[in-house]
Amino acid sequence: MTEPVESSEVKSPSYDLSKFRLKRILTNNTVRKSISLLGTFDDPADDAIVVLEKNAYRESEVATELPSEESESPKKPSYFSADLKVDTEFVNNIYGSYQVVPSRDLCGVKCTVIYPATEKHIEKYSVCQKYLIRETPDLYQRITLPYLTSSQFSLEWVYNILEHKQETERIVFEDKDPETGFILLPDLKWDGRNIESLYLLGIVHKHDIKSLRDLNGSHLDLLRNLRQSSKDAISKRYGINPNQLRMYFHYQPSFYHLHVHINPVRNDAPGIWCEKSHMLDTVINNLELMTDYYQRATLPFVLYEGNKLLDLYEQEQPIRVVPALGDDKEQPEKESADADPAKGCSNEEQEERQCKRIKLATPEPKEATAQACA
Ligand code: M7G
């Protein structure tokens, strides 16, 4: 039974995690060892998303005792102890294969719940096709900006953090300056246990910067402070060398209030792909070279099937239907309305062509390659 943290000011919905009822699996990522589930709790009308993720190994968990330490207590949990249950699968010559169950302390699974979940959350956590958009400043103004202004995830959780209503005890560092200040705290994705997989967020106090697109030369002091003060605070709290930290923005982000993602470079954190991440160092340098760089740049970003913004871009330029081979123009001509594959193929030939393309673009449904849009 899990009871979400409540404060007197902010009510969080309550639910009993053990009573989760599965409707369907949204993604099963065998590489990350995580599974995203759609279901319900007591009220069948409210959808819930539950994400289960096996924890990363901590180096202390594989430590073995030295003879001189045997009498020392208390013992830290370790795989190699009398508690380990071992089932032998096979032993062949010098090779052995086993299934082992370690002590209870080492069997924890990180669980994230979104309840009630909206259609947009379900979209974000589902397996889907992804497409790259090259967003010019004009396309941003005409298509992306109106869309994100009318349809975006609630920023309530961000304001709760900035106003010290939630997660207050998790704050690692705060600079309260309204122009250049920010709050540094663990990201929802971090299990909070393993420094190897450390994942922090730096959320700025300023309220009018939606994303990278809004940044200009006047924000350089804020960005430099974000970089330096975060590094200092992380070094002090976690003992991590500042030169081993990856600091970046997402474009497009899911939440349009400026925040920087921070994790160790040696850890492949989720969402570090080049099509989504912009290093803080590069952003600062671009603004030093050209103060309105992000108002002038064409910024690529990923859209996924099911996102309404993809349909809006499709009306502007063909995205799901790739131009015929050899017709690799910079800006492909707009195709006729009947070519919209989302509405099905209008004639057999087109259907066959389209199906071939989808087959090429769609990996075999191996679990190992299934990726959430998140
Ligand atoms: P993003 O780039 O806007 O979206 O990052 P994406 O990375 O999800 O596509 C938002 C970040 O905020 C993500 O890394 C989330 O894991 C994190 N996050 C989201 N929520 C709702 C919370 C929350 O309530 N608390 C904390 N600490 N982090 C959150």
Image: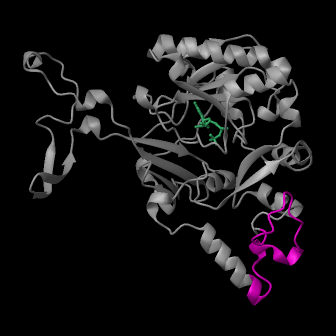
Residue 182 locus on image (x, y percent) = 68, 18
Could you tell me which residue is drawn at 60 percent across and 43 percent down? Answer: 273
Could you tell me which residue is drawn at 67 percent across and 42 percent down? Answer: 276
Residue 180 in the image: above or below residue 30:
above
Quarter of image, res 299: top right
Residue 174 locus on image (x, y percent) = 63, 13
Report the magenta residues as a range.
Answer: 323-350
Residue projecting furthest to the front: 326
Residue 175 in the image: above or below residue 142:
above
Residue 208 locus on image (x, y percent) = 83, 27
Residue 45 locus on image (x, y percent) = 61, 58
Could you tell me which residue is drawn at 84 percent across and 38 percent down? Answer: 297
Tell me which secondary structure the magenta stretch mostly adopts: loop
Could you tell me which residue is drawn at 54 percent across and 34 percent down? Answer: 188
Q: Nearer the viewer, residue 68 or 282?
A: 282
Q: Nearer the viewer, residue 52 or 139?
A: 139
Total count of labels: 0
Residue 13 falls inside the magenta stretch: no
Ligand 1 lies in quarter? top right
Q: Nearer the viewer, residue 244 or 371?
A: 244
In the displayed structure image, the side of residue 87 where residue 297 appears, left or right:
right
Is the N terminus in the top left, top right, bottom left or bottom right quadrant?
A: top left
Q: Nearer the viewer, residue 111 or 373?
A: 373
In the displayed structure image, the side of residue 203 where residue 86 appears, left or right:
left
Residue 94 in the image: above or below residue 319:
above
